[in-house]
Image (spheres, rainbow, N blue to C red):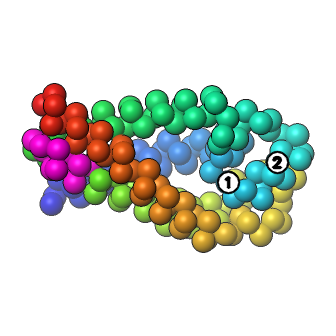
């Protein structure tokens, strides 16, 4: 249990540093995580093009590569530190860790920080009520939990086959 706690703290810290700094220093770089109305307004302002949306070929390829990379990293972590030695233990530990970071993102990063920080507001979108759309972030977290299933299944599969 203490191992999961330490892993969770480290993972949430690293996630905060990576995602938080990307959003803080370049909100347009993370526009795909913004509510649709803000994305639409930013596109109308000419600040982004279609290749920055979440349906572009480049975006999908980056997501697939990220999923594979994250699955491999999770497999290594739960094998090395949690003693996972089968698909079930690898999947379970990695999914638990994944969900902890997912809900950290939704509740702390999105609902507490994003919804209340002026640093994430893109010029031309000031005053849009969607910046405080808590339901959007909670729904995103639920979708994230579904996305975590194949990632963690990959981690469990790697442990079962290779470790």
Q: Looking at the rendered structure, which numbered label has been put on residue 42?
A: 2
Residue 63: % across, % down: 52, 36
Q: Which residues are magenta?
A: 84-94
Residue linked to disc 1: 34
Q: Main secondary structure of the magenta part?
A: helix
Gap in Å between the C-alphas at discs 1 and 2? 10 Å
In the image, is residue 135 part of the stretch drawn in magenta?
Answer: no
- For numbered disc 1, what is the local secondary structure? loop
Q: Badge 2, how many Cα within 10 Å: few under 14, some, many 20+? A: some
Identify whether 64 is placed above or below 96. above
- For numbered disc 2, what is the local secondary structure? helix
Would residue 25 be seen by someone viewing this image from the given angle?
A: no
Residue 45: % across, % down: 89, 45
The answer to whether residue 110 is left or right of residue 152 is right
Q: For residue 2, which quarter of the picture?
A: bottom left
In the image shown, does 10 or 36 lie closer to the viewer? 36
Identify whether 94 is placed above or below 47. below
Q: Which comes sooner in the sequence, label 1 or label 2?
A: 1
Q: For residue 114, which quarter of the picture?
A: bottom right
The answer to whether residue 31 is left or right of residue 72 is right
């Amino acid at each position: 249990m203490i191992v999961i706690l330490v892993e969770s703290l480290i993972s949430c810290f690293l996630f905060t540093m990576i995602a938080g700094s990307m959003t803080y220093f370049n909100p347009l770089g993370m526009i795909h995580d913004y509510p649709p109305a803000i994305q639409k307004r930013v596109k109308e302002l000419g600040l982004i093009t279609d290749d920055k949306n979440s349906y572009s070929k480049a975006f999908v390829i980056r997501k697939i590569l990220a999923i594979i990379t994250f699955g491999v990293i999770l497999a290594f972590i739960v094998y090395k530190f949690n003693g996972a030695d089968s698909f079930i233990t690898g999947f379970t530990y990695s999914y638990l860790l994944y969900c902890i970071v997912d809900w950290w993102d939704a509740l702390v990063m999105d609902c507490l920080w994003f919804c209340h920080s002026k640093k994430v507001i893109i010029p031309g979108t000031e005053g849009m009520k969607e910046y405080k759309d808590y339901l959007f972030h909670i729904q995103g977290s639920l979708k994230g939990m579904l996305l975590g299933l194949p990632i963690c299944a990959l981690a469990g599969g790697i442990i079962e086959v290779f470790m």
